[in-house]
Image: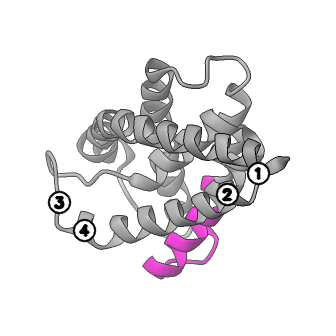
């Protein structure tokens, strides 16, 4: 269990740091990929709702702290996303790339739509249909492609550390 906590902490640090530094300079079709969504989807599908919700909460909290938006804004949405996806964990084969791709696409749309909804409630007026066409759908497509690649890496790391946990257990 300790190895998983350490790995999740390291992954959150790497993904949040990459999201707010390197990805600010990289645009694909006018949008930036969202590594936080990919991380939440990957952990939720592999480990379940408790770990998915926890990773979603702490990744969102770190992102809120770094970006400087209202604290808890991304944390709440990330946690809800992680818990929701973690419930799917028991119904599908955990390491299925097709399920990962579909979940990443849908999760990106839901995550970004929730961000726009909360922004609208807080007073920022945005055209949702225009945002959907120009930002959300292209970002969902990019996240899906990038998510499959990252998911395969996380699966490989997860397998290695799960076997370490079993060896250290006895």
Q: How many marks?
A: 4
Residue 77: image x %, image y %?
Answer: 61, 55
Q: Whole-Å distance between the Cαs marked 4 and 1? A: 36 Å
Pointers 3 and 4 in contact (C-beta within 8 Å):
yes
Q: Check disc 3 and report the residue beneath it.
A: 26
- The residue that appears at 16% across and 48% down in the rendered structure is 28
Q: Check disc 2 and report the residue beneath it.
A: 3
Residue that lies at the very extreme toward the right in this rendered image: 170
Residue 9: image x %, image y %?
Answer: 59, 65
In the rendered structure, the answer to whether residue 95 lies left or right of residue 91 reads: left
Q: Whole-Å distance between the Cαs marked 3 and 4? A: 7 Å
Q: Whole-Å distance between the Cαs marked 3 and 1? A: 41 Å
The residue nearer to you, when weighing 4 against 161, is 161
Q: Whole-Å distance between the Cαs marked 1 and 2? A: 10 Å
Residue 78: image x %, image y %?
Answer: 60, 54
Disc 3 packing (10 Å; few <14; some 14–19; many ≥20): few
Q: Which residues are magenta?
A: 58-78
Q: Check disc 1 and report the residue beneath it.
A: 168
Q: Earlier in the sequence, mark 2 or mark 3?
A: 2
Disc 1 packing (10 Å; few <14; some 14–19; many ≥20): few
Pointers 4 and 1 in contact (C-beta within 8 Å):
no
Q: Which colouring convention does the figure follow? A: one colour
Checking the image for residue 136, the label placed there is none
Vertical side of 57 occupied by 33: above or below: above
Vertical side of 59 occupied by 32: above or below: above
Vertical side of 84 occupied by 20: above or below: below
Q: Check disc 4 and report the residue beneath it.
A: 22
Disc 4 packing (10 Å; few <14; some 14–19; many ≥20): few
Q: Nearer the viewer, mark 4 or mark 1?
A: 1
Q: Whole-Å distance between the Cαs marked 2 and 3? A: 32 Å
Q: Nearer the viewer, mark 3 or mark 1?
A: 1
């Amino acid at each position: 269990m300790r190895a998983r906590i350490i790995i999740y902490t390291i992954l959150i640090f790497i993904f949040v740091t990459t999201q707010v530094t390197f990805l600010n300079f990289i645009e694909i079709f006018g949008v930036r990929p969202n590594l936080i969504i990919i991380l939440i989807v990957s952990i939720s599908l592999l480990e379940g709702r408790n770990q998915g919700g926890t990773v979603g909460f702490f990744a969102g909290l770190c992102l809120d702290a770094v970006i400087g938006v209202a604290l808890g804004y991304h944390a709440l949405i990330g946690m809800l996303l992680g818990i929701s996806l973690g419930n799917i964990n028991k119904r599908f084969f955990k390491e299925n790339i097709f399920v990962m791709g579909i979940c990443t696409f849908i999760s990106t749309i839901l995550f970004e739509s929730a961000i726009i909804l909360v922004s609208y409630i807080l007073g920022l007026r945005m055209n949702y249909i225009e945002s959907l066409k120009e930002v959300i759908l292209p970002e969902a497509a990019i996240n899906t492609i990038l998510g499959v690649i990252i998911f395969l890496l996380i699966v490989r790391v997860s397998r290695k550390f799960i076997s370490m946990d079993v060896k250290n257990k006895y």
